[in-house]
């Protein structure tokens, strides 16, 4: 896998890749709106001040982690458990980072951290598609910058709208209930293989069985149990396929 040099914005190819990234986000950004609005409302209902609620999506560019953090804060869990849960639920980002690391290893540590800070599912998917369409593209990071230039401000703007809506909408409406519904909707569309189904089933049952664990650690343990179930199921599927092929 060929390393990619840092973007030189004076080069036409770099600028073109950046604007390609901007254009590719046009059809995806509207899908951010419902979940971002709900996350904004939930942060207010969790008791965060307006400034803290705005800082959360600005610093935590991850909708699922943001939702989990606000849910734990609302349930009076300790801060370190809330942060740990937010990290565990987004462990897939470690896989994304591992896939991108050969391409950015020549960047400085600060540059690599900046790239990682804005990595989300959609941007990773777009980058993978661009690699298929344009193998060894030297302007992939410029393309990623174009994606990020739209994705992050849009998420922040939509969350801010939800935050101010949360200050107006009565708490009795309980709009934060839309967060678990959103996760269910995401889950239904994501489970497309045996390992993913195993991870979802085991993680779901574990979260119910371990709900009463102290410090709200049930979700953390359930996430880890689901991950292990997915890994073992994937190995089982691989073994079964190899055996039939043999």
Image (cartoon, rainbow, N blue to C red):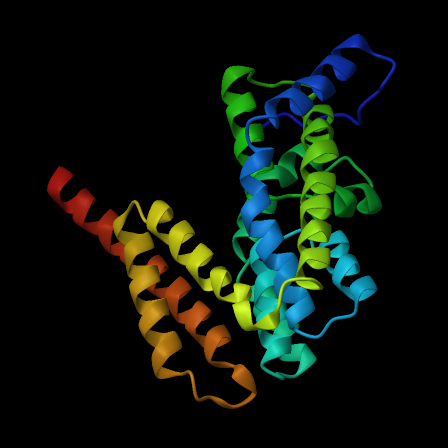
As drawn, is 117 to the left or to the right of 25? right
Q: In the depicted view, which residue is nearer to us: 108 or 176?
A: 176
The answer to which quarter of the image holds residue 51 is bottom right
Q: Is residue 27 above or below residue 62?
A: above
Residue at horizontal 63%, vertical 61%? Answer: 41
Picture quarter with the N terminus: top right
Residue at horizontal 78%, vertical 15%? Answer: 15
As drawn, is 111 to the left or to the right of 127? right
Q: How many marks?
A: 0
Residue 207 image position (x, y, % from top left): 39, 75
Residue furthest to the top in view is 12
Q: From where the camera sits, is residue 246 visible?
A: no
Q: In the depicted view, which residue is nearer to us: 98 or 23?
A: 23
The answer to which quarter of the image holds residue 66 is bottom right
Residue 237 image position (x, y, % from top left): 23, 50
Q: Is residue 218 above or below residue 144?
A: below
Q: Is residue 66 above or below residue 82?
A: above
Residue 10 image position (x, y, % from top left): 88, 14
């Amino acid at each position: 896998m060929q390393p990619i040099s840092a973007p030189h914005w004076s080069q036409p190819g770099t600028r073109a890749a950046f604007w390609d990234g901007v254009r590719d986000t046009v059809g995806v950004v509207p899908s951010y709106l419902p979940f971002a609005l709900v996350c904004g409302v939930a942060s207010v209902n969790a008791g965060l001040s307006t400034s803290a609620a705005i800082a959360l999506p600005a610093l935590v560019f991850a909708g699922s982690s943001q939702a989990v953090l606000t849910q734990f804060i609302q349930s009076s869990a300790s801060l370190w458990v809330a942060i740990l849960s937010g990290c565990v639920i987004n462990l897939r980002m470690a896989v994304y980072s591992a896939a991108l690391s050969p391409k950015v290893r020549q960047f400085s540590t600060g540059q690599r951290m900046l790239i990682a800070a804005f990595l989300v599912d959609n941007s990773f998917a777009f980058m993978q598609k661009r690699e298929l369409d344009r193998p060894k593209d030297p302007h992939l990071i410029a393309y990623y910058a174009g994606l990020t230039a739209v994705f992050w401000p849009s998420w922040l703007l939509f969350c801010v709208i939800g935050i101010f809506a949360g200050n107006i909408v009565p708490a009795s409406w309980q709009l934060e209930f839309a967060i678990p519904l959103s996760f269910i909707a995401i889950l239904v569309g994501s489970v497309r293989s045996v390992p993913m189904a195993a991870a979802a089933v085991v993680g779901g049952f574990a979260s119910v069985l371990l709900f009463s664990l102290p410090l709200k650690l049930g979700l953390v343990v359930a996430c880890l149990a689901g991950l292990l179930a997915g890994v073992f199921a994937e190995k089982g599927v691989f073994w079964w396929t190899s055996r039939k092929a043999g």
